[in-house]
Amino acid sequence: MTAGISPLSLILICWGLTGAVAITGLANLTQLDLVTTFMRREGISAEAFRGAGLAWIIIGLLAFAVGDLAARITRATPPARRPARTDVNRAARLTFRANLVLLGVTGLWIVTAAGQAGGLLPLAAAVFVDNLTTRDLLLESKLFTGMRLFYAALPATGGLAAGLLASRSLTKAARRAMLFTLVVNTVALCVLPIVMSQRLLLLQLLFSAYLTACLVRREVFGLLWMAVAAALFLGLWTAREAVTNPTIDGTALQVAWQKLAFYVINDMFNAFAPLNRPIPHTYGGLTLEGVMFLTLTDSYFLAQLAPKMAELDTVIGGGEFPFFTAAYVDFGMVGGVALIVA
């Protein structure tokens, strides 16, 4: 049974955990001096967490549940068809080769940056001395426009590798290749985010690997691995804070936990704030930005929406609006509900 990792279950788990952390943090702000400082810096006020935002989140969850139920009904009696046959060993070879390309581009990028820093060891040492300068050096050393997409795609091939490993149908050589892919990608995403700050890439890898394996097996198994994944991600989070905030009072663990609490509160603020005041609607500028990018129309539409986007900057902390709120910001209440259901 995979009901525990169905889309609706995952949405409820994510919002439940996020809400629990945010409530705990907001209830203990007097003891969380760093959280208070970060909130003040981003213009985040606890007064934004009002009933209107909570009501919209509940409406969004109900709308998602309606869409999920509709999808389940339509899938209840699928049309008769011959089952697809998948050559898992060929899929493993293709995944391995694609991942080598991703790793190769990423490795060449780091070697190029290291050449400007005097070598790999000086580059690694510079991370602990001046993390921001090292990050700027890496960004300036990009091999071509869009190159970071190769680095950001490592969770995808890692997830594929985990799913193929779970199939139990691989040859020994293919199994070794997929294990290599999963391990190397995990190591890469434990090291690179310390400089580039994209720690969520590791979280994406860990979740996609576990969910894909469960879907392939058609059962939820190996829950202990989720505990290992949580420890790995929190370890990376703490290491990143230890490197980038050496002058902040408190241990690395204290700084890391307060920074994590702040990020969660920040994301919940982004979910609540637009419901507390009149805002301009962007009619797809947020939820359809990916489509605009892929159709090469993003520069035109984002230029047209620039005044509205600038006004929205006053009702957002760092980061982005979460999906439910983005639907409301784009299309209002009725249109937002329709988008979520769809």
Image: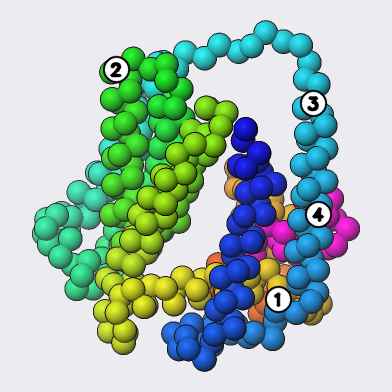
Task: Residue 135: name its quadrant.
Answer: bottom left
Quarter of the image with the N terminus is top right
Q: Residue furthest top?
A: 82
Q: Which residue corresponds to mark 3?
A: 76
Q: Which residue corresponds to mark 1?
A: 273
User: For the residues marked 4 and 1, what is the alpha-carbon distance in whole angstroms?
Assistant: 20 Å
Compared with 154, 329 (above or below) is below
Q: Give yes or no for contact between labels 2 and 1 (Cβ–Cβ under 8 Å).
A: no
Precedes in sequence: disc 4 or disc 3: 4
Residue nearest the observer in this picture, 318 or 247: 247
In this picture, residue 302 sits left or right of residue 220: right
Precedes in sequence: disc 4 or disc 1: 4
Residue 25 spot, x, y in % from top left: 55, 78
Mark 4 residue element: helix
Of badges 4 and 1, nearer the viewer stands 4
Residue drawn at x 63%, y 68% is 19
Mark 2 residue element: helix
Crowding near pointer 4: few (<14 within 10 Å), some, many (20+)? Answer: some
Q: Which residue corresponds to mark 4?
A: 62
Q: Which residue corresponds to mark 2?
A: 172
Work out whether residue 59 can be spotted.
yes
Q: Which residues are magenta?
A: 320-342
At label 3, the amino acid type is Ala
Precedes in sequence: disc 3 or disc 1: 3
Residue 316 spot, x, y in % from top left: 63, 74
Residue drawn at x 42%, y 16% is 169
User: For the residues marked 2 and 1, what is the alpha-carbon distance in whole angstroms?
Assistant: 53 Å
Residue drawn at x 88%, y 58% is 334
Precedes in sequence: disc 2 or disc 4: 4
